[in-house]
Image: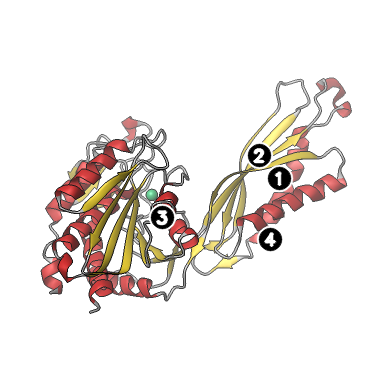
Amino acid sequence: MENEILARVNAQEVATLIQELVQIPTRNPPGLEKVGAEFICQRLQQWGIQAALVPEPYEDRPQVWGRVDGGAKEPTLVLNGHMDVVPEGDVTQWTYPPFEGRIANGRVYGRGSSDMKGGLAAMMTTARILNEIRERLRGTLILQFAVGEETAEPGTKRLLLSQGLRGDYGIVLEPTALRVATAEKGLAWFRVTLQGRPVHGSVAEQGINAIDKAMRFISEIKSYNQRISQRAHPLVGCAKCSVTMIQGGTKENVIPESCWVILDRRINPEEQVDTVEDEIRSILGGLASEDHDFRYNLERTTVYDSAEIPTDAFLARVVRKHAARIGGISQEPYGTLFSTDVRNLINDAGMEAITFGPGEPNQPHTFNESIAIDDVVTCIKVLLLTAQELFMGR
Ligand SMILES: [Zn+2]
């Protein structure tokens, strides 16, 4: 029976589907997922799969859900992917036009091919095949096609929480080269504004130089970064804090009245973002208590929480086993340094969820982004065998 199911995967059809998805330029920003959402929803419906658009959180940027009901309801497996892609950048840097979806050398080229239209094609094809054999399944498959992943918007979160599209197990199909990731690093961005008092440059000592205050703060951040680098996680490495942007001053001969710096803080699964913010606040508070002219404002602008499940969780073991057998993929525990919506499945919906998908993790957001068709085919086979094990209790 296993071979019978796997024989339903057709590499040519998979390649064409990835190509069709790449040809829809779902750029975000500005948030052009709509045509992609309509395409996915219609295609699922043509295949006889229950599917609908979700006009939430934005009416003009619908999300999509799909569903395959087996003969019994439990357990439920959720497959998640995002439809948006980052902008293509300088088109002249691309060998093939970024939204042509050129197939060459066993790969599909184009913006979003690996991040993550290959993953979407895997989700859709898996659902098509499971739908064909649904009377044999003892469980439910749910598909989530989210908006706004690239810009930290609450697409997946809404599908899980207000649409109730949750389950026992979840797989986010971001590119991991088919490694099973049970942990992911989070990140937070902070904007710290230092305030000064502007005077003419010729009487600098009478003013307060906001850039001087920023330098003082940055040197404290350097030692903070050394301290937190001791916090190492076995799968995602060290916590980090870097100054990534700075701007200050108004004119050559004016002592700067303000200066802001941006901190990029990489958060390990055992850290909490509120605690991290407290740490930065206490550095600022320490500087202010030593120096009455040290005035500041701290703002947290973006957060992607870290997330983690046990490396030996049932779903992780099942997927690892099939990925090793079908694709020769390493079974070593693995975590991602980048953030995915798996944090919403784990932290917000309390699900046992992993990140596992086709495509090399160094492809996203590059010129000439591409994905190997074989990788997507292998992914589909692993998903089918995983569903078979979860739903048919082999
Ligand atoms: Zn992605």
Task: Kindly check if marks 2 and 1 are in contact, taking CB atoms under 8 A apart as contact.
Answer: yes
Where in the figure is residue 259, as x and y percent of width and height? 70, 33
Label 2 sits on residue: 261
Label 4 sits on residue: 227
Residue at 26% x, 34% y is 97
Task: Kindly check if marks 4 and 1 are in contact, taking CB atoms under 8 A apart as contact.
Answer: no
- Quadrant location, the N terminus: bottom left
Q: Secondary structure at mark 2?
A: strand
Q: Which mark identifies residue 321? A: none
Where in the figure is residue 387, as x and y percent of width and height? 25, 68
**In the figure, 220 relative to 261: above or below?**
below
Residue at 36% x, 71% y is 315
Circle 1 Cα neighbour tier, 10 Å, few/some/many (<14 / 14–19 / ≥20): some
Amino acid type, mark 4: Arg
Q: CA distance from mark 1 to mark 3?
A: 39 Å
- Mark 3 vs mark 4: give the one in front: 3
